[in-house]
Image (cartoon, coloured by chain):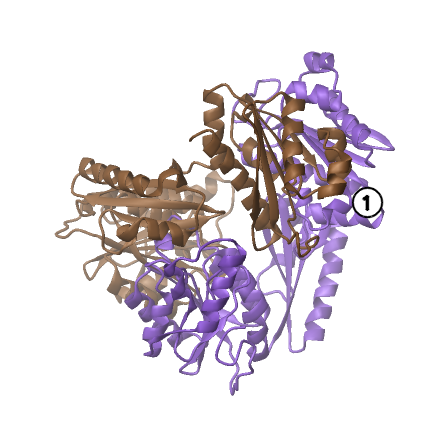
Chain colours: A purple, B brown
Amino acid sequence: MGSRGGWGRKHAMNRAYRTAGIISIGNELLSGRTVDTNAAYIAGRLRAIGLSVVCTYGVADEEPAIRRKLALAMEEADVLLITGGLGPTDDDLTRQGIAALLGVDLVLHEDLLEQLRQLFERRGIVMVRKNEVQACIPQGATAIPNEKGTAPGIRTEFGGKLLYAMPGVPGEMRHMLDRFVLPELRQYSAGQAIVVKRLRCFGAGESTIAEMIGDAMQRGKNPLVNCTVHAGVITLEIVAMAPEPAEADSMTVGEEQSLRAALGHLVYGTGDQTLAEVVGECLARNGRSLAVAESCTGGLLASLITDIPGSSRYFTHGWVTYSNQAKNTELQVPAEMIDKHGAVSGQVARAMAEGARRRSGADYAIAITGIAGPGGGSEQKPVGLVYIGVDSRDGAETSRFIFSSDRTFVRLRAAQTALNILRLKLRI
Amino acid sequence: MGSRGGWGRKHAMNRAYRTAGIISIGNELLSGRTVDTNAAYIAGRLRAIGLSVVCTYGVADEEPAIRRKLALAMEEADVLLITGGLGPTDDDLTRQGIAALLGVDLVLHEDLLEQLRQLFERRGIVMVRKNEVQACIPQGATAIPNEKGTAPGIRTEFGGKLLYAMPGVPGEMRHMLDRFVLPELRQYSAGQAIVVKRLRCFGAGESTIAEMIGDAMQRGKNPLVNCTVHAGVITLEIVAMAPEPAEADSMTVGEEQSLRAALGHLVYGTGDQTLAEVVGECLARNGRSLAVAESCTGGLLASLITDIPGSSRYFTHGWVTYSNQAKNTELQVPAEMIDKHGAVSGQVARAMAEGARRRSGADYAIAITGIAGPGGGSEQKPVGLVYIGVDSRDGAETSRFIFSSDRTFVRLRAAQTALNILRLKLRI
């Protein structure tokens, strides 16, 4: 892979790298169209291997500006991580900026061009001429394989510093960083071992969890606990520093025990695990199956479940019964029940779950009915009202929730809460 | 409000401001704990009043670093927007950094201190001594009222440039920007009206579209076209600048016509419209209904459709027939057909669509079956192979695709492509 001796060649290094700078390139970042999420992702990953980010730059798609900011960042940091501007269009100028910094030309690499051609061929697309620039690399630099897209990355050394340029598309960048850049940097980063461990929690708010874990989040502590929240999932990140990895590791183990003791069943997993993942693993392990019936979440619950590779081992059937007629014909929810209690009711959630389990023959069935909004609410049944039913051999149960905020949030929260109810039932 | 003559005093200005720099201050931004959403928000707001952001900086909570980056940004931009580092703790050093840049001392303002005391009293909290620093402002600068929190902002002029420092908490920053900073900047921004219009395209890659529209994306053009890609959707943003808004507006109209002429049916909408939105609007307008049957996308297609408020007007039924048995019992796909051609085949996609339309009575039915990966592929049927069937009163059609890359991408691309097929059928 790559060129000039191939990626993975060992480079002679006579110093340790401690600091890093991040340069994010693209007009879309300066116009406000796009939030730069790459910088934070890279910074977090570097921190975990003991490299400290000392500066970030956002730069327009202009060669002189790119060259200037690269030179500035090199004064401040040992390693430069660059994202964006590697695409095929005229405003993609990162490779030109790097070449200008190094004072070299761009060189077309036939092997990269051939890889590009094959990639397009596999996708059944004619490769237009504009794409050829993606096979160009500054003279003396190395291509970093892009396993998720067309534009290879660029790696080079200059003035005792290391430069890595990666695509701006987050999925491509993350994969390239994790698979090719971090393994190399890990060899060179110096001194303190940092071990990071994440606990994933669901079922309480950020401030409640902060109160439950006491002073673990206090600045200056080691291990230190950081807390972030995304889509109702609270992630507690334990960061331990010590001269030796084993020592840092045992510090995280101790901290994890205290956090688990304080939070009990609120902790559902570790790392990047999703609720759908832990539920799915448990079902697969026990040879159990799952079906779902959705109204207001409209397929989102099934989609979260089937996001997990291998979900066909336990997930068999899903129904999106958006109309009342569909609830009746597909899940045998009695029309009179819908007339009497309304489609958004505990009775209908229960009947949907029972119908889904009966028709699919699955061990568990989850059903969701609610009012996602923005329209359709009333005083008795406001926007955000959601009923969740779960049916199993132990019989059916329903719960009632009111989720606030917008349509997207209500739908996501309802789907996550449904998975959480099943998780608690499975005693995970 | 404020001090030294009060906020809102007219300042004598003898030049117009065209460019801006954004400096985001805080260790949390460099450690990866926090994504800097402020910079994009500010950039978007500035662009709407004709100020163009030319650089962004992320800086640690260190006075020398802050001073240095302020000086650098002043070389590049007419106006500096600074966020973060105005809190009461020891690592909040923005006011010190500005004072160092100006070569002045911090001055305690009694009126600001009194306002702070009253604020704490209203909240029923004892004001600790550490908070007093928030009443300190660099000599000669003005305080900007903070109506959402405790730390006032700072406004000053230096070397012909304008500097505004605002809190890092997004809610406080946004309010201060919109209420105090933008109204002042609007007076000074130089005459140019900017009109932005977006075209949304689907069905070809970024490089193909770039080739089709010729030199419209070339730097320096007015109107200028920027191109971004997200989940297969290409957004072309037309930015026109002119002394008068009406003139800029008519420039975007002309550019839009050329782009539409060049791209034909690849353009599906404007603004932030999604494929699900334009398809849904067309169905609703014509009183038509839609049902879907999904295998590899596992509910994602239904979820995209029901993301749209009011989708119950046209979307009635969805099936996630993940197992072969479900395809047979719920959609009457013959078991022999699955045995003979496999669940991932054009025949099964067609039978799923026909089954979904028959059972639901909908005007249109879309079906998707494929191999999302990472497992389950073979030489004949690789990961990424997807068949999409559409059934309507005109009969059923199927198409075959190979989407590359990972599970998430294959699923999303398959669902978007299915919507696009229906869009083209509806002649949108």
Q: Is residue B57 above or below residue A302?
A: below
Residue drawn at point x = 50 percent, y = 56 percent: A170
> What is the chain letter for disc 1?
A
Within the image, what quadrant is residue A390 found in?
top right
Q: Is residue A218 above or below residue B396?
A: below
Tell which of A199 and A320 is nearer to you. A320
Outermost left residue: B14
- Where does residue B344 sit, x and y in percent of width and height? 67, 44
Q: Mark 1, residues whose alpha carbon is within 10 Å: few (<14), some, or many (≥20)?
A: few
Tell which of B226 and A115 is nearer to you. A115
Element assignment for label 1: loop
- Where does residue B2 sit, x and y in percent of width and height? 30, 46
- Residue B1 appears anywhere in the view: no
Residue drawn at point x = 26 percent, y = 42 percent: B255
Q: Is residue A105 above or below residue A340?
A: below
Residue drawn at point x = 35 percent, y = 45 percent: B236
Tell which of B292 and A230 is nearer to you. B292
- Where does residue A194 sit, x and y in percent of width and height? 62, 70
Q: Is residue B426 above or below residue A183?
A: above
Within the image, what quadrant is residue B382 found in?
bottom right
Tell which of B161 and A428 is nearer to you. A428
- Where does residue A307 sit, x and y in percent of width and height? 65, 46
- The residue labelled by disc 1 is A427
B199 lies left or right of A151 = left
